[in-house]
């Protein structure tokens, strides 16, 4: 059961070659990425992909880096200090 959970979708943020942005995005989609955001001027995009497909995504020509999305939760302003 742990293997199934590990291959579920995870959020990722990619740095890509901005000069070939459209081509890299299309290749990333073919690798299994569901694109949720595009920033072509910055050469960045975000999306979700099955965890076991991350190595395939990293191998796409024009992908410079793949980072897992991280969620930071802050306590409410009136919460006591810990």
Image (cartoon, rainbow, N blue to C red):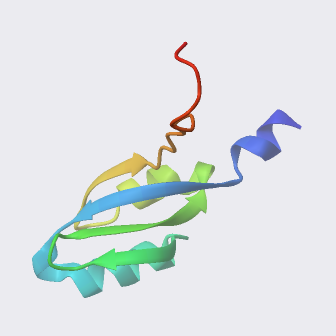
Relative to 34, residue 67 above or below: above
Where's residue 23, x and y in %? Answer: 27, 85
Q: Residue at x 27, y 87 (%)?
A: 22
> How many numbered discs?
0
Where's residue 71, x and y in %? Answer: 52, 44
**Which quadrant is the N terminus positioned in?**
top right
Q: Residue at x 57, y 62 (%)?
A: 49
Q: Residue at x 10, y 79 (%)?
A: 19
In terms of depth relative to the viewer, which is nearer, 59 or 9? 9
**Left or right for 20, reference 76:** left
Where's residue 45, x and y in %? Answer: 34, 69
Q: Residue furthest right?
A: 1
**Left or right for 54, reference 3:** left
Residue 27 picture quarter: bottom left
Relative to 60, residue 76 above or below: above
Residue 24 picture quarter: bottom left
Q: Residue furthest top?
A: 82
Q: Residue at x 41, y 66 (%)?
A: 46
Where's residue 18, x and y in %? Answer: 14, 75
Relative to 8, residue 17 above or below: below
**Which quadrant is the C terminus positioned in?**
top right
Q: Residue furthest front?
A: 78
Relative to 75, residue 44 above or below: below
Residue 28 picture quarter: bottom left
């Amino acid at each position: 059961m742990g293997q199934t959970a590990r291959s579920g979708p995870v959020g990722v943020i990619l740095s890509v070659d901005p000069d070939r942005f459209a081509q890299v995005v299309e290749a990333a989609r073919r690798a299994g990425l569901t694109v949720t955001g595009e920033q072509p001027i910055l050469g960045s995009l975000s999306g979700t992909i099955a965890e076991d497909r991350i190595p395939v995504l990293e191998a796409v020509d024009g992908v410079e880096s793949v980072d897992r999305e991280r969620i930071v939760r802050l306590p409410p302003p009136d919460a006591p200090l810990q």
